[in-house]
Image (cartoon, rainbow, N blue to C red):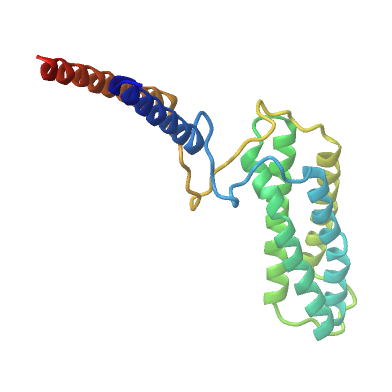
């Protein structure tokens, strides 16, 4: 094999390595850390069932605490209120991810109701401890009524068909997620530069060979 052929093989190998690096680093899609949120999460209605399960016993717990004022009833009410706040995060996220539809209106309504329930619960806990009341206070009654309305809305949400997104697996990169992307245009430009350098190297090699022969 001539020297020119050897240089050509080296250039071809370099070009192949560059192409492999470019396409393994990025491409048309964005790669993110494993904590990026994707469409692989469970169906929304299954997570809404967790919200319902946390909300259903809350009204009865509030009534019992309002009537007895015991420490154990207060502790149970606090626990249920905290659990509801944790599970209702799915509704907050759903409002941000869902775009205009009846489903969005239901999610928005549930979002505001759950926040109001949390506010009422905190107001009940912040007030004086009840002792020997025969009836629950107005805040407890409001919490119970709002809880029933919220359960009805959550039931409608589970029955409502979910809007199909254009891309079944949409990736949302969080603030702390790092992504690595090499645009296709940059990849083509790098390949062209390597080819140009290779051609220049081959041409220079030929010129040196001719000069030596003379």
Q: Quadrant of residue 140?
A: bottom right
Q: Is residue 210 left or right of residue 104?
A: left
Q: Is residue 50 left or right of residue 6?
A: right
Where is residue 8 drawn, in percent x and y? 34, 22
Extreme residue in the left direction: 214
Along the viewing direction, whichever of 121 and 48 lies nearer the viewer: 48
Where is residue 32 drawn, in percent x and y? 54, 45
Q: Quadrant of residue 169?
A: top right
Which residue is rendered at x = 44% and y = 28% of the image?
A: 16
Along the viewing direction, whichever of 168 and 62 lies nearer the viewer: 168
Residue 186 visible in image: no
Question: How many numbered discs, if any?
Answer: 0
Q: Is residue 212 left or right of residue 86?
A: left
Q: Eyeballing the image, is 187 above or below 36?
A: above
Which residue is rendered at x = 67% and y = 76% of the image?
A: 126
Q: Eyeballing the image, is 209 above or below 178?
A: above
Q: Eyeballing the image, is 6 above or below 172?
A: above
Along the viewing direction, whichever of 108 and 149 lies nearer the viewer: 108
Q: Quadrant of residue 101?
A: top right
Which residue is rendered at x = 48% and y = 33% of the image?
A: 20
Where is residue 63 drawn, in percent x and y? 86, 70
Quadrant of the image containing the N terminus: top left
Q: Is residue 184 left or right of residue 167?
A: left
Quadrant of the image containing the C terminus: top left
Where is residue 57 drawn, in percent x and y? 87, 64
Residue 162 visible in image: yes
Q: Eyeballing the image, is 29 above or below 80?
A: above
Which residue is rendered at x = 47% and y = 38% of the image?
A: 25
Extreme residue in the front direction: 213
């Amino acid at each position: 094999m001539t020297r020119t052929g050897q240089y050509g093989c080296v250039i071809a190998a370099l070009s192949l390595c560059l192409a492999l690096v470019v396409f393994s680093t990025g491409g048309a899609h964005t790669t993110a850390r494993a904590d990026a949120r994707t469409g692989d999460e469970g169906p929304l209605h299954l997570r809404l069932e967790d919200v319902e399960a946390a909300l259903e016993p809350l009204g009865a717990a509030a009534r019992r605490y309002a009537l007895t004022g015991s420490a154990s009833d207060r502790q149970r009410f606090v626990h249920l209120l905290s659990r509801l706040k944790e599970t209702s995060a799915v509704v907050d996220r759903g409002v941000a991810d869902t775009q205009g539809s009846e489903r969005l209106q239901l999610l928005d309504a549930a979002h505001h109701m759950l926040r109001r329930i949390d506010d009422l619960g905190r107001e009940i806990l912040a007030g004086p401890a009840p002792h020997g009341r025969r009836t629950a206070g107005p805040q407890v009654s409001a919490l119970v009524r709002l809880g029933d309305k919220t359960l009805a809305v959550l039931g409608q949400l589970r029955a409502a068909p979910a809007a199909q997104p254009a891309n079944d697996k949409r990736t949302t990169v969080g603030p702390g997620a790092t992504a690595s992307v090499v645009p296709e245009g940059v990849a083509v430009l790098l390949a062209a530069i390597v080819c140009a350098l290779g051609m220049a190297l081959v041409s220079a090699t030929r010129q040196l060979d001719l000069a030596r022969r003379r």
